[in-house]
Amino acid sequence: MPTLKQRIWGWYFFDWASQPYNTLLITFIFAPYVNELIGDGAQAQSAWGFGVGAAGFIIAVFAPVLGAMADLSGNRLRWIWLFSLLYVVGAYGLWWAAPGDFNLYLTLGFFAIGMIGMEFATIFTNSMLPDLGPKEQIGRISGNGWAFGYLGGLVGLVIMLLLLAENASTGKTLIGIDPIFGLDASTREGTRAVGPLTAIWYALFMVPFFLWVRDPKPAKRSGASVLQALGDVAQTIRKLPQSPSLFAYLASSMFYRDALNGMYFFGGIYAAGVLGWSVVDVGVFGILAIITGAVFAMLGGRADARFGPKPVIRVCILVLTFVAISIVFVSRDSVYGVAVGPNSALPDITFYILGALIGAAGGVIQAASRTMMVHQANPARMTEAFGLYALAGKATSFLAPTAIGIATALSGSQQIGVSPLILLFLIGLVLLAWVKPAGDGAK
C-alpha cells in the first residue's frame, strides 16, 4: 500500500505529466506555429480564439455532471484513465498539422480533444487534494504541485527548443543543429513533433500517479446514472445562493481565470504577430515565464499557508491586470506610447518582463485558487465541487477567446483584440470581496 508521501508525489506527477499541454501546445510552441502556417497574425488569433472557445463550451457543459457522477460512483481513477486517453489521442494528432497540407479544422479538432481530456482529468485529480493532508497544509501541497508541474513544462520546452523545434528560416534548432531523429526541417517535422512528444510525455509520467495514488472513496455498487448526476448538479446550483461565499468565489474565479487563460492562449500568437517573434523566440520567452512560475508557485504556496488563499489571489489579480493593460501598449513601434526604432530591443525586453510577471502571478493564483476551492466546498461532494469549479472556469471560457477573436477581427489589430482581458480581471477582483476565506461555515 503506498505511503502518504508516495500518494502526494504521485499526485504531483499529474501536474508534471499534464503541464506540457499548456506549455508546449497552448502557449509557446504550437500556437505560434499555427500563426506561421496561417500567415496572418490577426486571422490566426481570431481562428485560435473561436477554436479554443468551442472546446471550453464543451468542458463547461459536462464538467459538473461528470463530477457528480464520480461522487456518486466513488471511483475517480477510472475517469482519469478515460480522459487521459483523450489527452494522448488529441495531442498526438497535432503531428499532422503539416505546412503543405494544413487543415485548420482537423487541427483544432485534435487540439480540442486533447484539451478536453486534460481539463476533465484535472477535475478528478484536483478533487483528491483534500485527501492529501489537513487544511492547513493543502496550500503548501497545492503550490508545490503547481511548481513541480511548471518544472515539467520547462523540461519539455527545453527539449523542444534545443533538439526539435526548427527555425522556419534556417531549419536549425536553438543550438544550431538539425532536428534530431532525422526529422525533416523543410516540412517542419521538428516543430510538429511537439504533439507526439506531449502525448508520450503524459503517458510516461502518469505511471507514478497510477502506481501511487489511491482513491479513498470506495466504489459503490449502484452505478451512477447521468440523470441522477444531472439532478444532483441542478439541486446544487439551485442552492448556490444559500452559500453566498461559495457563489461569490465561483463567480469571481470564473472571470479572473478566464482572463488568465486568455493570456496563456494568446501570448504566443500575440508575440509572433505583433513583435514578429519566431517559434524559437517565443520558446525562450516561455522558459523565462516558466522559471518565474515555478519559483513563485512554491513561494505562493507558503504565503497561502500563512495568510490564506484570498489575499494571495487578490495580489495576483492586481499584477495580472497591470500586465493586461501593459500588453495593449507594447508593439514593435512603441512601448507605453513612446515611439521606438525598428531595431530597438525595448519592446522585446518589456515583453520578457511582462512574461515573467504572467508566469509568476499565474502560477501562484492557480495554486491558491484550488486551495480556496477546498475551503469553500462541501467535503462530501468534493469532485462535484471541482466540477462546478471547472464549470466556473469554463462557463465563460468561450468569452475571453471569443471576445478576443471578435475584437481582433473587427479592429484588425492584435493589440486592441486582447483588451477584453482587462475588464475580466477587474470583475473577478470586485466579486472576490464577497468571499469568506474559510467558506460559508465560518462565523
Image: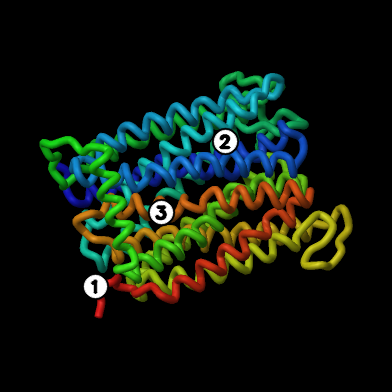
How far is the residue under mark 1 from the one under mark 2? 48 Å
| Amino acid of disc 1 | Gly
Residue corresponding to mark 2: 160
Residue 169 or residue 210, whichever sits in front: 210
Q: Residue furthest right?
A: 341
Q: Position of residue 61 (x, y in %)?
A: 42, 44
What number of labels is visible?
Answer: 3
| Amino acid of disc 2 | Met
Nearest to the eye among marks 2 and 3: give it: 3
Marks 1 and 2 in Cβ contact (< 8 Å): no
Secondary-structure class at tag 3: helix
Residue corresponding to mark 1: 441
Estimate how packed mark 1 is, as few (under 14), some (14 to 19) or many (20 or more) residues with alpha carbons within 10 Å. Answer: few
Occupied quadrant, residue 306: bottom left
Secondary-structure class at tag 1: loop
Instruction: Tell me what residue is drawn at x 68 percent, y 43 percent.
Output: 46
Answer with mark 1 or mark 2, whichever residue precedes in sequence: 2
- Is residue 10 something one can see in this rendering? no
The C terminus - image quarter: bottom left
Residue corresponding to mark 3: 146
Q: Position of residue 139 (x, y in %)?
A: 33, 64
Secondary-structure class at tag 2: helix
Occupied quadrant, residue 36: top right
How far is the residue under mark 2 from the one under mark 3? 21 Å
Q: Residue furthest left?
A: 221
What numbered label is drawn on residue 289?
Answer: none
Horizontal side of residue 145 vs 382, given as left or right: right
**In this view, 241 is above or below 14:** below
Q: Position of residue 397 (x, y in %)?
A: 52, 50
Nearest to the eye among marks 3 and 1: give it: 1
Residue 401 or residue 261, whichever sits in front: 401
